[in-house]
Image: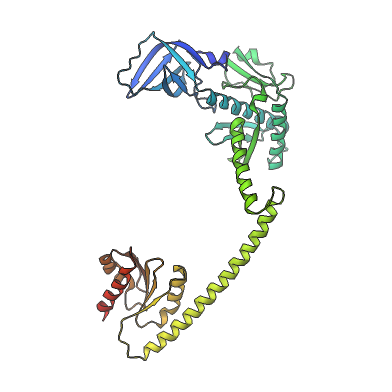
Amino acid sequence: MNTVKLYEKDQYLKHCKAKLVDVTESGKDFILVLDQTIFFPTGGGQSCDKGKINDFEVSDVYEKEGIIFHKVRCNDSNIVWNIGDEVYCEIAWEHRFLNMQRHCGEHILSGIFYREYGGVNRGFHMGDSYMTIDINLEENPAITVLTWEMAERVEQLANQVIWSNAPVVIRHFETNQEAADLPLRKALTIEKDISIVCVGDTENPADCVACCGTHPSTAGQVGLVKILRLENYKGMFRIYCEAGSRAMEIFNTYHHIITKLNNKYSANSEDLLGKMAVQEEKTKALRNQFHLLRQSIIKERIQALSIDLEALKTSSDQTAIIAKEYNDMALDDLLTIGRALTPQLTKLLAIISRTDNTVLFFSDGKIDCGKLVKENAAIYQGKGGGNNTNARAIFPKNDFIDTFIDLLEKHLR
């Protein structure tokens, strides 16, 4: 026996009583079948209703061969479901009404894409954060590209339908022949038990198509539709959009962001982009100036170290490691300095950055930097690695750096 779908007759029905006709236990979940239900199952791109049955949360609703199954989570191990018992069903109305708004908004957008540009809806999904409609421009071969300007026009026309508060009528037919005279934007692919949703006058509707979802009785209850993004998708055009209170939430988020940006740049919405562009130019100029200063400092320190290295070649200094400390430079800059000096090295060069608790080692290859780090850094809780001419060691404390370098000094002598 098929489940009686009360939501098909009254989509504003929020609660009802029903009889339990079947129950299956699965762990802490129970799968309930009722003789009638107000719960819409997942289908047609729309998520299922939420709510409660006898005060137990309904986590999923799905349909198979005309029977609707309700998954209920029962943490009480003593609960008993008896076939034939009367149960009380209550849907989460806020979730249901949002689905009604979103689904109807999608209908209006799809209908106008079809009417204006021959765009056929080949896919629809109501996600948690946005809806998507996949439009194929197959009915009007003269149009090959769906532009943002075209999408904006559809959005404006769709909102005009909403603001006109056009009626949304759902008609049920036993066979597809009974619905054949309606101005459908898609040919019927099912033979019986057909629901047709028509937005507006049937002589010239904003949309008229077969659909099993839930919808408000008038388009005005949708409130607003908003197209968010447009992209190419598998030879079609994917429309990211929202409707109803979810569209309003997105607007509020955008408004909050714009307000913060206006305050930051001492701007208003009309001149915000211009002021941001001016600031970006200033930032770009500062970055260029900073880059030139960095390069100048790197060059000066390479030259100074080069002079020191040349002097060491003729000195009587017996130390095995040349240690230099720079705490005002990034590690990448220190690497540039060390690599530039590698051809001059006759000893191990250690460049220390206490800011990063790191030591960079450089040599001409006769002293294997990577091997030194790998074999000794762990003694002082260090880690790192490298190759024969360049390696790095990173320590949890600055104090370990001096002790580690002293260890290598004794090791290399």
Q: Is residue 243 visible?
A: yes
Q: In this picture, is 286 found above or below 319?
A: above
The structure residue drawn at horizontal position 27% and vertical position 69%, both measured from the top left corner, is 376
- Judge left or right: residue 109 versus residue 48: right
* Residue 194 figure quarter: top right
Q: Residue 313: percent from the left, percent from the top?
A: 37, 88
**Residue 101's image quarter?**
top right
State which quadrant residue 327 falls in. bottom left
Left or right: residue 296 versus residue 186 is: left
Where is the N terminus found, in terms of image quarters? Answer: top left
In this view, which residue lies farthest toward the right? 203
70 left or right of 245 in image: left
Is residue 17 toward the left or the right of residue 101 in the image?
left
Q: Which sits in the foreground, 226 or 281?
A: 281
- Residue shown at 63%/35% (left/top)? 135
Colour mapping used in the image: rainbow
Residue 130 percent across, percent down from the top left:
56, 36
At x 58%, y 24%, the residue is 100
Residue at position x 44%, y 83% in the image: 306
